[in-house]
Amino acid sequence: MTAKRTLIVWMLMLGASQVFAQSQAEKDKIRELELQRQMERTRKITMQMDSAVRLSEEGHYEAADVKFRAILKTIRSVPSDLTFHFGKNSFFLGKYRQSVDWLNKYIQLKGTQGQYSDQAMEWLAKAESELLKENEKEAKRAAEVLSGDYYIDCGPTGKVVCPTCKGSAVIVKKNYFGDVYKTCPSCNKLGYLSCDDYNKLLKGKLNKAE
């Protein structure tokens, strides 16, 4: 009985080891397939990025931007080189805030030792300068005093010659068949506006049927 038990235990152990070996082999195969898939994804992304960079270098910035954005939608982890190229391309599109953001990312990742570090710092300085100019323009626009913000006194008559049709009461439009005359949509055949309607027109709030 002891010999039989030993044989049974040995056979069970042998079977278990075979099952384990088979299971390990399957895991290794799955791991290898996943690695191959990852390598293929990386290869495709690299090809797409090379294509986008080439478009940017040739001056096709809009087309390059489309490709860069397509890449960003399909990846989980953004390659550091992409942050540089996307940031630089954004500068040429006048998207200075976007350019500053992505170029900063490259410098944060690579410091001064990256392949594009020197270029990244140069383009970042340019993008920051342009962004500062934009901010200054926006600040000036915010401080502008426009007539549309106020109610304009039209004088004792309470009427103003219609600015849309210059008092003619019609609008002339040209097409392939010649001139087309339409009733002025602002004054409705009158050639003038009341003071209230004039102020509404200045604010873009005048709604009159043609």
Image (cartoon, grey):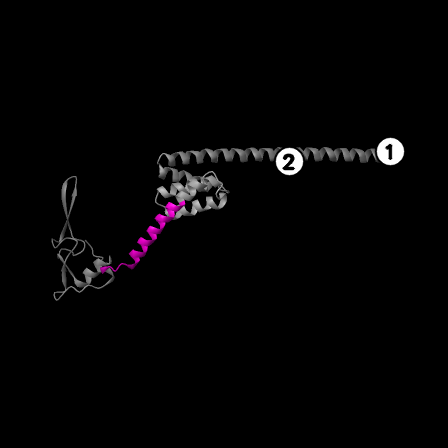
Q: Which residue is mark 2?
A: 27
Q: Taking 16 as reference, is 34 left or right?
A: left
- Quarter where residue 189 is shown: bottom left
Circle number at residue 3: 1
Residue in the picture at 50% in, 33% down: 43
Circle number at residue 63: none
| Residue neighbourhood size for the residue with mark 2, other residues' Cα within 10 Å, grouped as few (<14), some (14–19), many (≥20) | few
Q: Earlier in the sequence, mark 2 or mark 1?
A: 1
Asked if the stretch drawn in magenta spans residue 143, the answer is yes
Quadrant including the N terminus: top right
Vertical order, 70 against 128 (above or below) = above
Q: Residue 102: where, in percent of width, then height?
A: 43, 45
Residue 14 visible (yes or no): yes
Q: Is there a contact, CB below 8 Å, between mark 2 and mark 1?
A: no
Residue in the picture at 66% in, 33% down: 25
Front one among 154 and 175: 154
Vertical order, 156 against 210 (above or below) = below
Residue 1 visible (yes or no): no
Front one among 64 and 198: 64
Vertical order, 29 against 99 (above or below) = above
* Element carrying mark 1: helix
Q: Which residues are magenta?
A: 124-147
- Which amino acid type is shown beneath numbered disc 2? Lys
Q: Residue 61: where, in percent of width, then height?
A: 36, 38
Residue in the picture at 68% in, 33% down: 22
Tell me how far mark 2 sits from mark 1, CA to CA: 36 Å
- Which amino acid type is shown beneath numbered disc 1? Ala
